[in-house]
Amino acid sequence: MMVAESDILNASILIVDDQAVNVSLLERLLREAGFACVASTMNPHEVCALHRKNRYDLILLDLRMPGMDGFQVMEGLKTDDADGDLSVLVITAEPGHKPRALQAGAKDFISKPFDLVEVKTRIHNMLEVRLLYKKLENDNKMLKRLDRMKSEFVSTVSHELRTPLTSIRDSLEVLASGVAGSLPDKARSFIEIAQNNCERLIRLINDILDIEKIESEQMSFALRPLDLMELIDQTVKADEGFAAQHNVRLQLVAAQPGAKVHADPDRLAQVMTNLISNACKFSPPGSTVDIAVTREGGRLKVAVADYGPGISDEFLARIFQRFSRADSSDARQKGGTGLGLSISKAIVERLGGEIGFTTEKGKGTTFYFFLPECSEPAATASDASLARPR
Ligand SMILES: Nc1ncnc2c1ncn2[C@@H]1O[C@H](COP(=O)(O)OP(=O)(O)OP(=O)(O)O)[C@@H](O)[C@H]1O
Ligand SMILES: [Mg+2]
């Protein structure tokens, strides 16, 4: 990033000195160096008001002035300076004042009697740094604004897409059910393809909306004490059909009856469903996916283990990133978008927990998450509308 020389020369400078000869010397020097916006005052009492009005890029401040010295001026300037970007260069003949001035908030100093090259160089450098900061700040603001616009755009488009898609899904369901008249087998198989793809699109849109909500910290959580085993039983039941499609059996190998967690049942089911669906997608046909709930180090641990291919070393570091899949052909073969784990991680962390995995090539993968145990009595989880596997 660069600052144009013309911007430096157009920066606004205020000279504060009680002696007319110093003021005119500095003014002349700055004009000769090409600076175009140089103002001055010999009255230290009006510096704060002037700065409030003009927001100078640089104030050249004499320290020794009668009535109000440079240190007092700086105190006044600092109380006005909410952003902490005050740019003061002190002018002093006393070497002992330099550290005190820096402590008081000056950015640099020039010594009297003036060494013209020193004065010009210090002013130039200081303005360059100052303008760079300003530019950085502006760019940052602009990027944040663009990022917000992007998020709003993605959310709006996703919302707008969801409504017609849901209507398409409903219509396809009606067609498939035969209510609108019986369909030839060929037509029915096309309807089924359309239904599957429609579901896939709706899931993707819901995931994108979830990601946006997580990013903007607007994902809502209806937290309450929950019976963990009840929720897990329900999710396992709901996911059995999906497992069967992959010729996989879900089995609960360890339970903690009565264990309670403080969580949002829908969100927790979303995590479970993603871990179970991943395990099923990557399981060899005929194998099992083992779900275990244990206590470890005072926390509850839920583990979902498969006997699949494991996760390659190159992919380990990226697994929780958005849209990351070990193999892009997975998307077509296994119907995923690579958002599930990133959403699961955010949910588990929001619930005060931690998510992780262990994997061994050719042997299988275990995804697990820890949650703090809750001692309040649990409400029933049965009213949770559970997420569907994909
Ligand atoms: N149990 C597993 N065994 C092997 N690889 C896995 C396993 N779980 C996840 N992965 C890898 O991590 C990737 C990301 O998983 P993630 O759940 O985030 O996305 P996805 O399942 O592809 O899509 P979706 O957004 O529908 O969940 C998967 O595509 C896969 O490459
Ligand atoms: Mg997934």
Image (spheres, grey):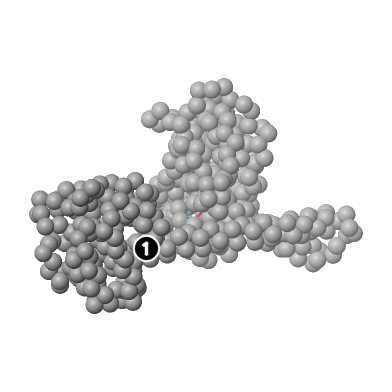
Say what amino acid the circle numbered 1 marks: Lys
The answer to whether residue 115 is above or below residue 371 is below
Q: Residue at x 66, y 32 (%)?
A: 382
**Residue sitting at 53 percent across and 55 percent down?**
339
Residue at the location (15% across, 68% down)? 118
Q: Is residue 100 above or below residue 384?
A: below
Residue 257, quarter of the rendered image: top right
Q: Is residue 336 left or right of residue 87?
A: right
Q: Is residue 145 left or right of residue 24?
A: right
Give x and y (percent) for residue 309.
45, 55
The picture places residue 355, in percent across and down from the top left corner, at: 44, 43
Determine the image quadrant of residue 27: bottom left
The image shows residue 265, relative to residue 104, as above or below, that is above
Q: Is mark 1 within 8 Å of ligand 1?
A: no
Number of marks in picture: 1
Judging by the rendered image, the residue that carries numbered circle 1 is 134
In the displayed structure, does residue 346 sit left or right of residue 80?
right
Percent x, y of residue 1: 33, 71
Residue nearest the viewer, comparing 141 with 52: 52
Examine the rendering and report whether any part of residue 132 can be seen: no
| Residue found at x 37% / y 63% | 134
| Left or right of residue 259, residue 7 in this image | left
Q: In this orientation, does residue 380 appear?
A: yes
Q: Position of residue 51 (x, y in %)?
A: 36, 57
Viewer-closest of 280 and 79: 79
Q: Nearer the viewer, residue 79 or 354?
A: 79
* Picture layout, residue 160 above or below residue 297: below
Report crowding for label 1: few under 14, some 14 to 19, many 20 or more residues within 10 A (C-alpha): some
Q: Secondary structure at mark 1?
A: helix
Towards the viewer: 338 or 151: 151
